[in-house]
Image (cartoon, grey):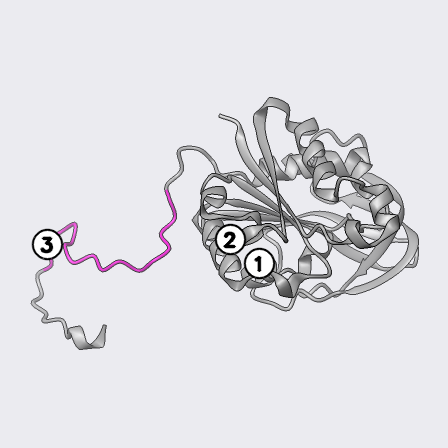
Amino acid sequence: MPLNVTVWHEFRHEKTNETVKNLYPDGMHIVMKQAIEETLGDGVNVRTATLDEPEHGLTDEVLDNTDVLTWWGHAAHAEVSDEIVDKVVKRVLSGMGLVVLHSGHYAKVFRRLMGTGCGLKWREAAERERIWCVNPGHAITAGLEKDYFELEHVEMYGEPFDVPVPDELIFISWFEGGEVFRSGAVWKRGGGRIFYFRPGHETFPIYYDKNVRRVLGNGVKYVAPIPGTLGHTLNAPNIKVPLSPIQAEHEVDESLH
């Protein structure tokens, strides 16, 4: 069955900044949607959702029918409802995949799932970035022609990056100004997987780059739930009936629970 993907985007810069509007006249989320469809074809059904829609476009119906959620935010992280954040986190722990892009490192959803501040160094100087694959053969790198690719003009993100040690490190970036950054990494949280991918500053045409588009599509496919796997337990059920007989006699003090 095709994957159901929801591309979530803040969709604010395109409305207020001419540079961003000229690059992404219909919104960055539309270009991201096209990139995922371009890479995965009939294997996906992609919808979009934006900050200013009711419930940020992430209603219970949408989330319940989303296999993978992608997230791009920047200037309005604080405006994302804590109630929606709770729902997204619960869905990830239940098995939904999450792809967090660029400045989404500071999103409430990502910080909650990482359990850290997710801070980093940055500089906007239109410098060159060389993105090295440090995990050759990984599914997220499928279709890349070399062991690195370059972006001509980017915003720099530099170490230290305040996140837990990744379960899988896919890419490391070098920047013209000298810094390096863990720019592609995967974590497992509950039943879900999270892929963070650094490129994507709004004033540069990064989501038109063929390699970025390929990685975005591959990342969506990689973090998708695996059909047939067991569901993940989110609560703490009391199993009063054991699988095998228990010899000891014990009276439970229910007041302690």
**Which residue is disc 1 drawn over?**
109
Could you tell which of marks 3 and 2 lies nearer the N-terminus?
2
The magenta stretch spans which residues? 231-246
**Magenta-colored stretch includes residue 97:** no
Q: Residue 14 location, x and y as percent? A: 78, 49
Report helix, strand or loop for mark 1. Answer: helix
Report helix, strand or loop for mark 3. Answer: loop
Q: Residue at x 55, y 61 (%)?
A: 81
Q: Residue 92 location, x and y as percent? A: 49, 50
Q: Amino acid at mark 3?
A: Pro
| Res 205 visible | no
**Which residue is disc 3 drawn over?**
245
Point out the frontmost of discs 3 and 1.
Answer: 1
**Is disc 1 surrounded by few (<14), some (14 to 19) or many (20+) residues within 10 Å?**
many
Left or right of 208 on screen, residue 230:
left
Marks 1/2 in contact by CB < 8 Å: the verdict is yes
**Which residue is disc 2 drawn over?**
88
Q: Amino acid at mark 2?
A: Val
Q: Residue at x 64, y 68 (%)?
A: 117
Q: Residue 224 location, x and y as percent? A: 53, 38
| Res 212 visible | yes
